[in-house]
Image (cartoon, rainbow, N blue to C red):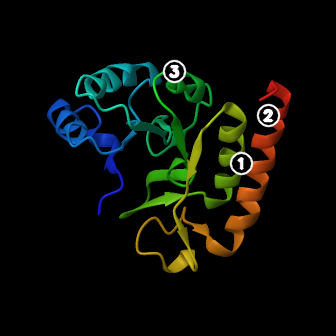
Amino acid sequence: VLDLLQIPAFMCRQTDLIVAAAQTQRPLNIKKAQFMAPEELRLVIEKIHETGNDQVLLTERGTFFGYGRLVNDMTSIPTMSRYAPVVFDATHSCQLPGRAGDVTGGRREMAPVLARAAVAAGAHALFLEVHDRPERARSDASTVWPLDRLADLLTDCLRIHEAIQAKQGV
């Protein structure tokens, strides 16, 4: 059983792949490439909608800022939300590509800062890679969020979401 097809960031401009995935009529999660402006996703969404598939999420995971650094522009969340619901990838956004030699480095401690900011900016969902022992994770060990700290982070994010909704009268 397949619940959702995810298109990786570096493949999100491959028209044949996007169209083929959309034609399955399965929900899609398109990760925004780190080199793309959020407005460029409009064309990706149009290609998907042309297949009759309107089940799509867009994931923000940072933008390259020079070499070995990602930054997050939270204004991309409301921009991308004009096209589809936005997922914010809080752990991949903490990566420092190429900064740890043969593996990607990162700053795990920044995940909660970014997650809370993304919720305040209007993200519809959060994505976090989680592990019970992050230092033993086989992938992205420097940015994986500790499982025993997940509930507290999600509680914080839910409170922010509820405060924003109350302020907006939703």
Looking at the rendered structure, which numbered label has been put on residue 82? 3
Position of residue 40 relative to residue 107, above or below, is above
Dot 3 alpha-carbon crowd within 10 angstroms: few under 14, some 14 to 19, many 20 or more: few
Residue at (38%, 20%) from the top-left corner?
42
Describe residue 122's horizontal placement relative to residue 40 as left or right: right
Whole-angstrom CA distance, mark 2 to mark 3, is 18 Å
Quarter of the image with the N terminus in it? bottom left
Query: Mark 2 highlights which residue?
Result: 164
Kindly identify the residue that appears in the image at 49 percent across and 59 percent down.
105
Say which residue appears at 50% left-offset and 39% top-offset.
62
- Residue pointed to by mark 1: 113
Dot 3 amino acid type = Arg
**Element carrying mark 2:** helix
Q: Horizontal placement of 59 versus 169: left or right?
A: left
Check disc 1 and give the amino acid type.
Answer: Val
Q: Secondary structure at mark 1?
A: helix
The relative height of residue 163 versus residue 141 in the rendered view (above or below) is above
